Image (spheres, grey):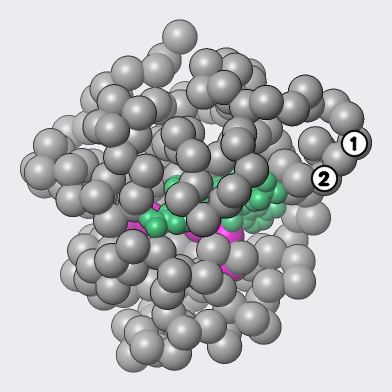
């Protein structure tokens, strides 16, 4: 069981993949492996959310989502965590503020799919997030164009790094973000739940 406070040392570059993970799937794995490679990350922490503030549907219990995510995240650089439950946060801006204070010298990178960039401007204190940590955004079927036209992308157009500069993202000063085009995976937790392979609630 790897839930708990993960180790993070000064000088490390650590990606944060926040998510409902209801359930975790190979799309999470694909973007995580791509992030490790492209952004030269030492670790990626999968932060299993107590509950996305913008989703009304109640997720499966935390312990079940964590146990299942650990079965998917079989990689020495990936750590599944219940950090947000420990911190008592559900809002990413708060989580990041707490983590940067708790892990001085660690270079965090926020990771997310293009669908989340599309609605980033609806998150609490969203500009604070972009101004605090570099971000890696991953193409997702159906969301590429919307991501490019999104409010966050437009506001922070000048902070976008080209893909060829991706390896410097983790060490860049925020705001800085990179859009990664990768062979897109159509898998989603929604589709898995609809298929009946993951019991509700
Ligand atoms: N196939 C994928 N391609 C790119 N990004 C993805 C993919 N699947 C998940 N992500 C990203 O991983 C993060 C966590 O995703 P989440 O746990 O909500 O899974 P999901 O499949 O998007 O779930 P749901 O279908 O319930 O919304 C989000 O930033 C999401 O955009
Ligand atoms: O901080 C917010 O207002 C906020 C609003 C929506 C989503 N998030 C975070 O975005 C991450 C992805 O959520 P999800 O449900 O798409 O996996 C997860 O860590 C959520 O807590 C955060």
State the image coordinates of residue 56 (x, y, percent, origin top left). Answer: 59, 48
Residue positioned 52% across, 16% down in the render: 63
Quarter the C terminus occupies:
top right
User: 166 or 98, which is in the foreground?
Assistant: 98
State the image coordinates of residue 173 (x, y, percent, origin top left). Answer: 19, 69
Quarter the N terminus occupies:
top left
Instruction: For label 1, count other residues whose C-alpha is less than 10 Å away and answer few (under 14), some (14-19) or many (20+).
Output: few
Q: Main secondary structure of the magenta part?
A: strand
The residue stretch that appears in magenta:
109-114
**81 part of magenta stretch:** no
Question: Mark 2 CB in 8 Å range of ligand 1?
Answer: yes
Instruction: State the CA–CA distance, disc 1 to disc 2.
Output: 6 Å
Position of residue 201 in the picture relative to residue 66 (left or right): right
Residue positioned 49% across, 39% down in the render: 51
Position of residue 104 in the picture relative to residue 200 (left or right): left
- Give the total number of marks visible in the rendering: 2
User: 128 or 104, which is in the foreground?
Assistant: 128
Tell me the number on the disc at residue 191: 2
Tag 1 residue: 195
Residue positioned 55% across, 73% down in the render: 118
Identify the element where label 2 is drawn. Answer: helix
Residue 66, above or below 129: above
* Mark 1–mark 2 CB contact (< 8 Å): yes
Residue 162, above or below 89: below
Q: Is residue 5 visible?
A: yes
Q: Residue furthest front?
A: 56
State the image coordinates of residue 98 (x, y, percent, origin top left). Answer: 18, 43
**113 part of magenta stretch:** yes
Residue positioned 82% across, 45% down in the render: 191
Identify the element where label 1 is drawn. Answer: loop
Image quarter of residue 159? bottom left
């Amino acid at each position: 069981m790897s839930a708990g406070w993960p180790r993070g040392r000064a000088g490390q570059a650590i990606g944060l993949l926040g998510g409902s993970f209801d359930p975790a799937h190979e799309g999470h794995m694909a973007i995580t492996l791509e992030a490790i490679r492209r952004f030269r990350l030492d670790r990626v922490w999968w932060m299993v959310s107590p509950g996305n503030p913008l989703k009304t549907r109640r997720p499966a219990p935390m312990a079940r989502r964590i146990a299942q995510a650990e079965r998917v995240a079989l990689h020495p650089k990936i750590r599944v965590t219940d950090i947000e439950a420990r911190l008592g946060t559900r809002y990413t801006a708060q989580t990041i503020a707490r983590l940067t204070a708790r892990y001085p010298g660690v270079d965090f990178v926020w990771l997310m799919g293009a669908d989340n960039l599309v609605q980033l401007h609806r998150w609490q204190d969203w500009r604070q997030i972009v101004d605090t940590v570099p971000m890696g955004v991953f193409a997702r079927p159906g969301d590429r164009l919307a991501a490019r036209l999104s409010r966050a992308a437009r506001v922070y157009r000048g902070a976008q790094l080209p893909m060829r500069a991706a390896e410097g993202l983790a060490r860049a000063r925020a705001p800085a973000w990179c859009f990664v085009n990768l062979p897109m995976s159509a898998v989603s937790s929604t589709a898995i739940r609809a298929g009946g392979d993951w019991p509700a609630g």
